[in-house]
Amino acid sequence: MKSSNPITPALAGLPPEIAAELEDHLLESAAHSQSRGAPAADAQRLALHQLGDPASIAHACHRAVRCPWWCRRGLPIEWRALVAGWMALGIFFTSRVCVAPEPSTLSIAVCILAGIASVALGAILLRGRARLRRLAVAASIALTALGGILLALAEIRPALSTSFALGPSLSFALATFGLLSTGVLQSRRLRRWAS
Amino acid sequence: MAQVKISKELTAASATSIVLGILRDGESYGYAIVQRVRELSQNEVEWTDGMLYPILHRLEAEGLISARWGESETGRKRKYYRLEPAAAEVMEDERRQWTTIHRILTGLWAPKMS
């Protein structure tokens, strides 16, 4: 009588990647038992017993990766601060639309775009990919330049800064955040982490 | 000397350090990691095979290890894990913590001079 394979049905319905990983484990474990003289079916049953319930393992794997950014231990603290900073900046930019007394269409569009771009950068940095450091450096330099331009414009065309609800102090704050962000990203620790 | 069985709680607490320590020796995969734990602990640490995978997936999500799909020697799909540079700091932190605990307990349990 042909012996039934208990591994395939045990993995049915699991996400394909986890199923493939567990299948490899089970087959290698079974092969190990077979090399010690166990019959194939017994070896596979033993492998399943030693592994535990595949559905529970898949569920535990799923839960394990739902780790919010603040619990990702691999991210340096400066990197997490940057994520929080850029996210907050996005909210700040977007809020300008509501705060400006008479916002022009251009200022609304610019504020929303800048807000989305900042939140998007924060979200990208959340992935913790060290190679994104250069992108973040470029964004930080661009923000510093933007803050500087707005600061200059506040002097030359005060009406424009009113439209964006970005007075000299806020423009200065933006430029300072950009500089700080650049400085942190260029710090020796983050450079070493990213290398 | 009687064999010591490590409690479930201690096994769970040390699992991350053990997995990272094993991967420090080079790229590896699930079954091989479990076998290495058994070999190192001489079966004193009771690891169920299944407890490894949530740990590996969490470490991967945390950016401490990365994974790639490759092939086993028999041509089967196999997921290999390796350490990421970010793991060095975490491993050093874990090492300090375990060393401190070891020092405290060694001091407490040292034979008293009377």
Image (cartoon, coloured by chain):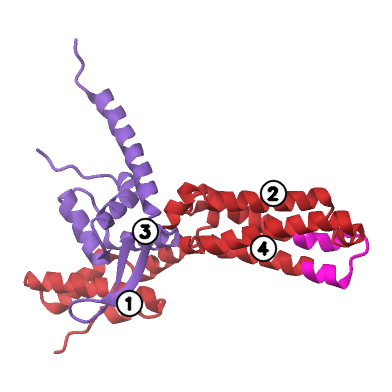
Chain colours: A red, B purple
Circles 2, 1 touching at the beta carbon (< 8 Å): no
Instruction: Please give the residue where the numbered disc 3 appears in the rendered image.
Output: B84
Q: Chain of mark 4?
A: A
Q: Secondary structure at mark 1?
A: helix
Instruction: Give how far across and how far down residue B31 sits, in percent.
Output: 23, 66
Q: Residue at x 39, y 58 (%)?
A: B59
Position of the C terminus of chain B by quadrant:
top left
Residue B9 magenta? no
Per the rendering, the mark at residue A176 is 2
- The 10 Å Cα crowd at callout 2, few under 14, some 14 to 19, many 20 or more, is some
Q: Chain of mark 2?
A: A
Q: Residue at x 28, y 76 (%)?
A: B70
Cα distance, mark 2 to mark 4? 16 Å
Per the rendering, the mark at residue B72 is none
Q: Secondary structure at mark 3?
A: loop
Instruction: Give how far across and how far down residue A176 sits, in percent.
Output: 69, 49
Cα distance, mark 3 to mark 2? 32 Å
Q: Nearer the viewer, mark 2 or mark 4?
A: 2
